[in-house]
């Protein structure tokens, strides 16, 4: 059973059937969606016909474009909006993931703005996207902050990205190489000769606890985490 919004620290504002959750009734989370329904549709997605049933029953009906929560309420927001612009109205994929409307750029822009608004300044936004129909770079331009880290499944076109809120995002994007060769992202709070760095761990989409490292021992790397510039070459191990 999930908590009410006065105590929950995690928000999933478009949670669908909660497939990405290990615990679909997590005690510390609020599950939202704009619909509440149980639907059975024909599934042809695996080459054979059959009827499948999907259950979407959020804790609260909500619209990610206008979230019913105060500023800085949550420590983690998991934003997994629909990614399809084309899908048959009675298709399994549309039933499961929903479909973007004709104003999808405005909708997602408002969604990003709202998710960051309700996120605590030390919070993390996890954004999930499948780019089979709309490229990730086009969608990231709709976010007010660039994501510092990502995890990518190339074959499936799926991405999971983690973004930090204002304070950290202001300086996130400056990348450094540490003396031992590890790469890191500069976080807010670096001063003088000391850098506050969050080490990039391949396959792990969250900023690690910042380490303080002497600036003179580090080498600045060209930033690739700017709006619309998505690194193409890296492959995360999972
Ligand atoms: C990609 S699915 C989410 C899948 C989910 N993360 C999972 O693990 O099963 C997107 C969901 O967003 C919902 N949705 C679409 N537009 C919305 C909006 N404006 N506000 C809230 N939810 C919305 C859809 O109903 C759909 O359930």
Image: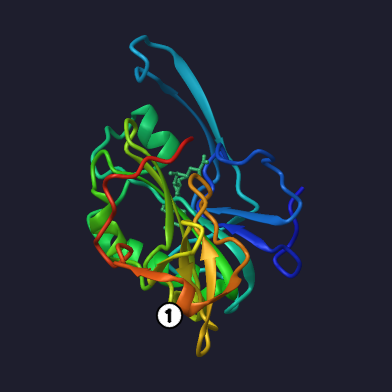
Task: Give coordinates of residue 182: x percent, y percent.
Answer: 48, 56
Colour scheme employed for the rendering of this structure: rainbow
Which is more toward the observer, 141 or 73? 141
Q: Is residue 121 above or below residue 110?
A: below
Residue 189 lies left or right of residue 1; in this view the side is left
Q: Is residue 48 above or below residue 159?
A: above
Which is more toward the observer, 22 or 62? 22
Q: Is mark 1 within 8 Å of ligand 1?
A: no
- Count up the numbered dots: 1
Q: Quadrant of residue 92?
A: top left
Task: Give coordinates of residue 88: x percent, y percent.
Answer: 27, 32
Q: Quadrant of residue 20?
A: top right
Residue 103 lies left or right of residue 34; in this view the side is left
Q: Is residue 96 above or below residue 224?
A: above
Residue 149 lies left or right of residue 210; in this view the side is left
Tell me which residue sits at (55%, 61%) in the image.
207
Residue located beneath label 1 in the image: 170
Task: Give coordinates of residue 110: x percent, y percent.
Answer: 37, 69
Extreme residue in the bottom direction? 192
Extreme residue in the top direction? 48
SS at circle 1: loop
Tell me which residue sits at (35%, 17%) in the image.
44
Task: Give coordinates of residue 41: x percent, y percent.
Answer: 42, 24
How packed is label 1: few (under 14 Cα within 10 Å), some, or many (20 or more)?
Answer: some
Which is more toward the observer, 122 or 210? 210
Tell me which residue sits at (72%, 47%) in the image.
26
Which is more toward the observer, 121 or 204? 204
Tell me which residue sits at (64%, 60%) in the image.
10
């Amino acid at each position: 059973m999930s908590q009410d919004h006065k105590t929950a620290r995690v928000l999933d504002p478009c949670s669908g059937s909660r497939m990405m959750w290990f615990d679909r009734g997590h005690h510390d989370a609020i599950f939202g969606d704009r619909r509440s329904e149980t639907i059975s549709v024909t599934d042809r997605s695996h080459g054979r016909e059959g009827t499948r049933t999907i259950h979407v029953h959020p804790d609260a009906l909500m619209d990610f474009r206008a979230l019913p929560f105060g500023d800085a309420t949550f420590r983690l927001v998991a934003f997994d909006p629909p990614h399809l612009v084309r899908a048959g109205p009675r298709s399994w994929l549309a039933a499961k993931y929903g479909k973007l409307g004709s104003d999808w750029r405005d909708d997602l822009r408002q969604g990003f703005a709202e998710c960051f608004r309700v996120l605590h300044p030390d919070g993390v936004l996890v954004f999930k996207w499948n780019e089979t129909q709309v490229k990730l770079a086009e969608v990231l331009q709709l976010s007010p902050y660039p994501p510092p880290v990502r995890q990518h499944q190339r074959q499936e076109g799926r991405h999971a990205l983690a973004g930090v809120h204002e304070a950290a995002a202001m300086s996130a994007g400056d990348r450094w190489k540490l003396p031992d060769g590890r790469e890191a992202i500069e976080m807010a709070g670096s001063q003088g000769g000391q850098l506050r760095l969050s080490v990039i761990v391949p396959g792990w989409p969250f900023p690690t606890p910042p380490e303080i490292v002497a600036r003179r021992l580090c080498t600045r790397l060209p930033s690739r985490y700017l709006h619309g510039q998505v690194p193409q070459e890296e492959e995360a191990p999972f």
